[in-house]
């Protein structure tokens, strides 16, 4: 009789412990699932890598690295947040194909003034914006290239030394 009572008490404590433990576990899982779901639905809704990058009068982009998801569109919004004219402090965003040497391209591009410093019919580029000056904005959209690491630059003469970065497709 005595043993039976003890057994019941032990059992009761055990099941309470089990229940509360199970409850916590479930809560955690639910929270995790919720986060995951909202992240995924956001991506599906947009189906877009929406990137904003700025250039200033000090010859700088605000980003050295851009990461995008493969298999989706990429929208690049380039904003010139400076005041200087595009003939003096012009900026563009040029995304190079893999294997293209950035310095070699930059040097070649510098003489292509008529086509805003992207050589006409260039096979070195994946996408590029027009050249803009202070206060202006340029927007382009293109399909994300295949997974890998690419380089981007501003091809205005003399800018690629400072205005460049990595474009990573994951
Ligand atoms: Co520039």
Image (cartoon, grey):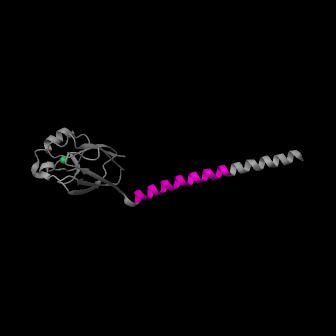
Magenta-highlighted residues: 20-44
Residue 29 horizontal/vertical position (percent): 57, 52
How many marks are shown on the rendered structure?
0
Residue 169 horizontal/vertical position (percent): 34, 46
Magenta segment's dominant SS is helix
Residue 117 in view (yes/no): no
- Residue that sits furthest to the bottom in the current view: 45
Q: Is residue 4 left or right of residue 24?
A: right
| Observer-nearest of 31 and 145 | 31
Q: Is residue 30 left or right of residue 11?
A: left
Q: Is 46 covered by the magenta stretch?
A: no
Residue 46 horizontal/vertical position (percent): 37, 59
Q: Quadrant of the rendered structure where residue 30 is? A: bottom right
Residue 135 horizontal/vertical position (percent): 20, 57
- Residue that sits furthest to the right in the current view: 1
Residue 15 in view (yes/no): yes
Residue drawn 17% across the image and 42% down it: 106
| Observer-nearest of 125 and 154 | 154
Q: Is 33 covered by the magenta stretch?
A: yes
Residue drawn 31% across the image and 53% down it: 51
């Amino acid at each position: 009789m005595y043993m039976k009572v003890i057994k019941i008490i032990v059992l009761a404590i055990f099941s309470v412990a089990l229940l509360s433990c199970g409850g916590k576990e479930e809560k955690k899982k639910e929270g995790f699932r919720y986060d995951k779901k909202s992240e995924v639905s956001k991506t599906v809704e947009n189906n877009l890598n929406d990137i904003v990058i700025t250039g200033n009068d000090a010859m700088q982009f605000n980003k050295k690295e851009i990461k995008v998801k493969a298999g989706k569109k990429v929208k690049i919004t380039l904003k010139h947040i400076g005041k200087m004219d595009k003939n003096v402090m012009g900026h563009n965003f040029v995304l190079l194909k893999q294997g293209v040497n950035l310095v070699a391209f930059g040097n070649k591009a510098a003489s292509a003034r008529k086509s805003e410093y992207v050589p006409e019919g260039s096979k070195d580029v994946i996408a590029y914006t027009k050249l803009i000056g202070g206060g202006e904005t340029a927007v382009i959209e293109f399909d994300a290239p295949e997974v890998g690491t690419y380089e981007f630059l501003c091809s205005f003469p003399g800018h690629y030394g400072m205005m460049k970065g990595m474009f990573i497709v994951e």
